[in-house]
Image (cartoon, rainbow, N blue to C red):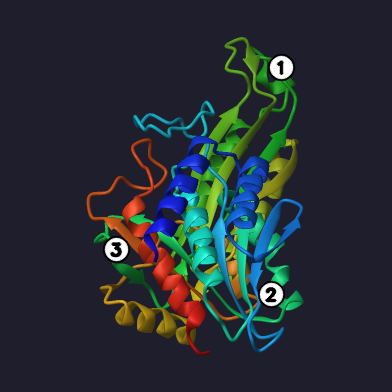
Amino acid sequence: MKKEHLEKIIGLRHKLHAHPELSMAETGTKAAIRAFLERNTSLEVVGRGAWLYAVKRGTAGHGGGIAFRADMDALPIPETVGLAYGSACAGVSHKCGHDGHCAALCGLALELDGMETGRDVYLIFQPGEEIGAGGQICAGLIAEKDIREIYAFHNLGGWPEGAVVYRRGLTQPASEGLTVRFTGRTSHASAPEEGVNPSFALAELALYARELLARDHRGMVLCTVVGLRAGTGDFGVSAGEGEIRFTLRAEREDEMMALETALLARAGELARACGAAVDHEISDRFPETRNDDGCLDRVLRCAGALGLPAVAMDELWRASEDFGWYTKACPGALFYLGSGEDWPPLHTTGYDFNDRILPIAVDMMAALAAGDR
């Protein structure tokens, strides 16, 4: 990419990094991206409430377009790295690199502005990836605009800097948060029989989850207890309510849903047995992300043409990604760019996006945009 373009998007990346926003609250981020696009390109920019997209019109007219996605949200992690552009928002920072994803997509916009493409090219700036909400909202654009394929990249430490890392088929699993709440009745700790204490029901449900995991599955299935509490901890009060929180994760969405169904059925049985009420809540649901072979082949051809090393990922990346909402609607591929084998991991306090991979991300996406179907 052009040097002046790179300097602009590095500046944008640092600006976004300094002003991070949590999922579904990315108003300032969205405004900064829109201002950058309108000031520096002639692309059409369209606001859609919580998100926006830009489009480069192709010479073939409307229909049969290609799309690229960047996510905008940050994480509730404090900034502890001494950066000149460090987060100005207490307890919030870009520790997953979405600032870099947005900057790279804006870099693609700069490159597209001087290119001729046969197809319409859509650049989707999505909110709420960290909670699995934004992709589902934005994926409706696929059918609306007759988009035929979609791509995205994610930065990833632990891999050679600048390498294109990929996996065929399933690349990231489905997951969801499941909260189960039991409501009983408090009593004096000396007379627990006078109340309804759900603590044993909670414990039994946790043990039942372990039993479910021991059964045969067609792919990886995980059920991680992320929270477990009952009562207030007051030594004079027998607990009258409590909750357990699980993260369910599976290679196959149907197996994740079967796990959810089994846990809720057992929770109902335990609640009836102890005389408590029970309810539940589903949070942060992510679909499977599966790469289309044809789209991934295009990614690898572009990497080869650019002289970039391509490294196959033997095991799926267990973290979830809501790009799967798009690949339910059309063929697509999510690839990764290595940040460096010793680069700090995502979602850790020592992490910051590696600016050196920005031009590689832009060149990859520009090559995909320019190529034939």
Residue 162: assigned label = 3
Q: Quadrant of residue 66?
A: bottom right
Earlier sequence position, callout 1 versus callout 3: 3
Say what secondary structure mark 1 lies in: strand
- Which one is closest to the eye, mark 2 or mark 3? 3
Q: Residues within 10 Å of mark 1 (few under 14, many from 20)?
A: some
Q: How crowded is mark 3: few (under 14 residues within 10 Å), some or many (20 or more)?
A: many
Q: Residue at x 74, y 41 (%)?
A: 278
Q: Residue at x 55, y 65 (%)?
A: 109
Q: Quadrant of residue 69?
A: bottom right
Mark 1–mark 3 Cα distance, whole angstroms, equals: 61 Å
Earlier sequence position, callout 2 versus callout 3: 2
Q: Which residue is drawn at 69% across and 63% down?
A: 138
- Which one is closest to the eye, mark 2 or mark 1? 2
* Residue 83 x/y as whole percent: 36, 33
Residue of label 2: 142
Q: Which amino acid does label 2 sit on?
A: Ile
Q: Residues within 10 Å of mark 2 (few under 14, many from 20)?
A: many
* Residue 129 x/y as whole percent: 58, 53
Q: What residue type is labelled 1?
A: Ser
- Which one is closest to the eye, mark 1 or mark 3? 3
* Residue 315 x/y as whole percent: 34, 68
Whether residue 115 is situated above or below residue 293 in the rendered picture: above
Q: Residue furthest top?
A: 236
Say what secondary structure mark 2 lies in: helix
Say left or right for 332 vs 57: left
Residue of label 1: 187
Say left or right for 175 vs 281: left
Q: Is residue 252 visible?
A: no
Q: Are the residues tagged 1 and 3 within 8 Å (C-beta)?
A: no
